Image (spheres, rainbow, N blue to C red):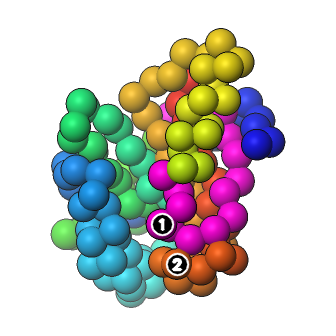
Amino acid sequence: MNTTIKTVPPLTALTVSRRLKLADIPEFAGTAVGPLCEKAGQMGLQFVGDLVFLYEFHGEDIDCTIAQPVAEAKGDPTPYKFVTTESFRCLSTLYVGGMPGIGKAWDELMHAANAQGLKNTPFCREVYVKWVDFESPQDETELQAGIQ
């Protein structure tokens, strides 16, 4: 597995969030992504990056924030929220394949972090670089594991 340590710059995004279990992420994404992006389009927001899922782990629970990066926070986003993140230091890799195999890729990335002596944080991100569909072997997702 090829990995890179990098610092991702801050981003401003239109977001929707929910606290849930790992197994509930696909259902949440399936119902939330379309309406979120539709709202951003209706508001005339300029997309400036790929869709990002921001995760904060709390034991068995995860705060999952689906974020569409935009050029600026303007207008009334209701029922969504604008969020501006801080820069994010991470160990990164590109996973190519469908979502059913992404858990194994995350396990490999976390193993790589441990092997490099890196200290993880409770924050992780997935950047959907290329999306075909849930099971496509052509999907490209950048996995970003937060590190200290």
Task: State the residue position of label 2.
Answer: 135
Q: Residue at x 48, y 40 (%)?
A: 124
Asked if the magenta segment contains residue 96, the reply would be yes
Find residue 108 and report its image quarter: top right
Query: Where does residue 112 sit, x and y in percent of width and height?
Result: 67, 29
Task: State the residue position of label 1.
Answer: 100
Task: Name above or below for residue 113 compared with residue 49.
Answer: above
Query: Where does residue 126 sit, x and y in percent of width and height?
Result: 53, 53
Identify the image quadrant of the N terminus: top right
Q: Earlier in the sequence, mark 2 or mark 1?
A: 1
| Circle 2 SS class | loop
The three-letter amino acid code for the residue at tag 2 is: Glu
| Circle 1 SS class | helix
Labels 2 & 1 near each other (Cβ < 8 A): yes
Q: Residue at x 51, y 22 (%)?
A: 120
Task: Name above or below for residue 59 compared with residue 107.
Answer: above
Query: Where does residue 83 sit, x and y in percent of width and height?
Result: 38, 50
Q: Is residue 112 left or right of residue 15?
A: right
The three-letter amino acid code for the residue at tag 1 is: Pro
Task: Name above or below for residue 5 compared with residue 44.
Answer: above
Nearest the camera: 16 or 128?
Answer: 128
Query: Where does residue 30 sit, x and y in percent of width and height?
Result: 33, 77
Q: Which residues are magenta?
A: 86-103
